[in-house]
Amino acid sequence: MITGKGITKTFKQRGNVLGGREVHALRGVDFSIAKGGAASFIGESGCGKTTLGRIIAGLESYDGGEVSIDGTPLSPLKPKQRQPHFRKIQMIHQDPYSALNPTRTIHQTLYAPLALRAGQTGRSKAWIEERAAEVLSLVGLDPGTVLARYPHQLSGGMRQRVVIARALTVDPEMLVADEAVSMIDVSLRLGILALLKDLREQLGVSVLFITHDVATARYIGDDGELYVIYRGQVVERGPVDTIIADPVHPYTQSLLSAIPVLHGLEQPGEQPVVPVESLNGAQSEEGCLFAGRCPFRTDRCESELPLLGVTNGFPQEHACFYPERRSVIARPMSEV
Ligand SMILES: Nc1ncnc2c1ncn2[C@@H]1O[C@H](COP(=O)(O)OP(=O)(O)O)[C@@H](O)[C@H]1O
Ligand SMILES: [Mg+2]
């Protein structure tokens, strides 16, 4: 189980002579992902998803709050003491082209991490070969065909499967898939998503999907938890089905609607889709972070920050003073 409490992260971006700009990438985020569980972070580009994923994978530091793995808080530990915790968490990036060394065959790619493990555990060379074939089979590739090939001889989908196979060589407890299908041919995406789902069921590995795309987020499985992130704050959180069916935060509603940035769009016989103002709208640091784009804002929203919590009898957590079920038109699954 990995948990985070009040995680904050501010980047100082290099600016001009007048000084840099501070970017509040994360503003007090809580999360909890159980062993074997699934979660999905969704939100538009720049909202802090990758930063949070990298913190969870031990690749990025945080300024405030605390991350704990199986109950052990990590910030008091020295980097060396943290390593064994983070080794169990493997990140899969969006670009399988750059993730693989083009001069190495798939056999060489898998051999290196397996040889390291074999050395540590006193296993034989035969075990390495066996395990290399095994991890390829687990990701749906035929070892006989793939092992001798170089990355450029494989399709993007096959390459991403190899990246996942390489992650499996360390027997991870968690896979963090950061936009893992966004650069894959549309026709191959569902296969990769189904694979991650299968690995979770077969191996009990937890899966964290990071995506800007609702259809992908939805694919984590019925028992998965959805975190909707806006400008570094989780604005809605709960079971994926509940939130997709009945989102109560206007931002989630805009993400789920078919055409998110049109004003006052109405369909015959339907209530209006939540009309959301464009991204270029005010990005105030005061009050609700979404207020500048929200069609339902009041004076209160412009001065007070709503915190994530459960109110008004809704099952999910939300960070809105005026949560309400509003009709949205979800994107069809075929857009994955
Ligand atoms: N290493 C960095 N240095 C400076 N700013 C960063 C760095 N990494 C991310 N940011 C900024 O933090 C914010 C969140 O980025 P990121 O986590 O990559 O968002 P997402 O993955 O949701 O697109 C963005 O404004 C981004 O520009
Ligand atoms: Mg990102």
Image (tube, grey):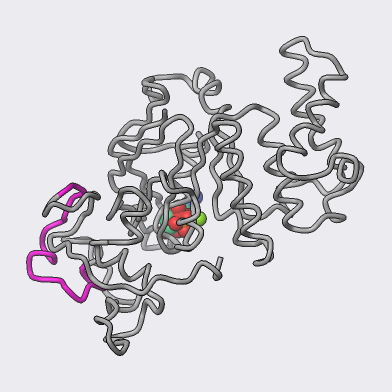
Residue 201 shows in this picture: yes
Q: Which of 176 and 323 is in front in this view?
A: 323
Quadrant of the rendering where the C terminus is positioned: bottom right
Residue 13 shows in this picture: no
Q: Residue at x 13, y 51 (%)?
A: 311
Q: Is residue 298 magenta?
A: yes
Q: In this view, does 22 lie to the left or right of 110?
A: left
Q: Nearer the viewer, residue 316 or 119?
A: 316
Q: Residue at x 85, y 35 (%)?
A: 108
Q: Residue furthest bottom?
A: 268
Residue 44 appears at what percent x and percent y?
42, 64
Q: Which residue is drawn at 54% across and 19% down?
A: 80
Q: Which of 159 and 133 is in front in this view?
A: 133
Looking at the rendering, the stretch of residues picked out in magenta corresponds to 291-310
Residue 194 appears at what percent x and percent y?
60, 50
Q: Does the magenta stretch include residue 331?
A: no
Residue 288 appears at what percent x and percent y?
19, 61
Q: In which quarter of the image is residue 84?
A: top right
Q: Is residue 144 left or right of residue 279?
A: right
Q: Is residue 166 left or right of residue 33?
A: right
